[in-house]
Image (cartoon, helix red, strand yellow):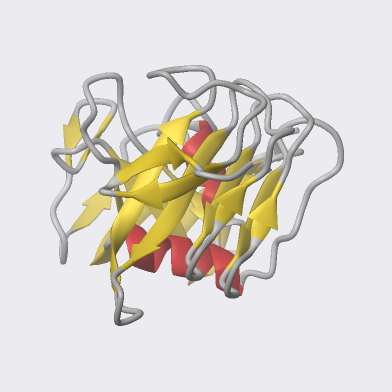
Amino acid sequence: MAKKAKLQEESVVAIKAFDHELKCRGFQFAVGETYDAKGEVIVCLNGFHAVTMDNPFHAWDFYPPVDTEGRLTRYATVSQSGAMQEEKTDGGVKIASAKISIDAELSLPAFIKRGVEAIISSLKGDYSTQAASGYSSTFEITGQNGVIACSGNNGRVSAKTVAGTWVSLAEYDKDGKCIGFATGCIGTDGLAPGHVYIAKGGKLVKAEAE
């Protein structure tokens, strides 16, 4: 539920997601710039929006990791200040603010690392979020519209993962160096529920032995 906007004397550091052009709702942003909103700050209606650091993956509720044309979402750490209003849901906290500074852009691996460091293992009910950085982590989510992210080596998505679950797994070369992330949504692009998936060749593929 949204709270009435109030003046925040000190800035709040948050995470903001953008489309592939670093735009949000058609507004062009740039790293290092500060922007001021006109009018009353109202969540989802007016102001600059970002999600709190306690669950960066909440950004995926608004910008999935990959858009419908296969283009990656972009992320940045931001500072919000001035009048603010927040909205709390099961997925996390979104803040609308009168002022926002785009501090630094985050790569997808860095974004996922932030999520992992938030030590979020799960949320109750649907819209579950799971993240880990350990070796050979295995996940399963049985609720709808979940999010799984793993930055560790040899991460796997288990057979019970259901349609609508967004998955992002790190891929490593033979020397143990991370070479990127494979991201997709179970139930689309040939990713069917009821299988184990791993990251290979920049894509989510079925594990050879399930």
Classify residue 150 as left or right of residue 143.
Answer: left
On-image quarter of the N terminus: top right
**Can see residue 178?**
yes
State the residue in front, 168 or 155: 155
User: In screen coordinates, is 122 left or right of 209?
Assistant: right
Residue closer to the observer: 157 or 25:
157
Residue at image point 74% right, 33% down:
160
Q: Is residue 176 above or below residue 77?
A: below
Toward the right, the furthest residue is 124
Q: Is residue 91 left or right of residue 136?
A: right
Task: Looking at this view, name the residue that lies furthest to the front.
Answer: 209
Q: How many marks?
A: 0
Please name whichever residue, 163 or 172, is drawn nearer the observer in this view of the structure: 172
The answer to whether residue 111 is above or below residue 135 is above
Where in the figure is residue 44, as x and y percent of width and height? 50, 27
104 relative to 2, above or below: below
* Image spot of residue 120 (x, y percent): 70, 61
Query: Does residue 78 appear anywhere in the picture?
Result: no
Q: Position of residue 26 (x, y in %)?
A: 20, 26
Residue 19 rendering spot, x and y as whole percentages? 25, 36
In the image as oriented, which residue stretches furthest toward the bottom? 175
Looking at the rendering, in which quadrant would you find the C terminus? top right
Q: Is residue 103 above or below residue 199?
A: below
**Which quadrant holds residue 204?**
top left
User: In the drawing, does residue 3 fall left or right of residue 29?
Assistant: right
Q: From the viewer's side, name the closer residue of 80 and 182.
A: 182
Q: Name the residue rendered at 29%, 41% in the picture.
A: 73
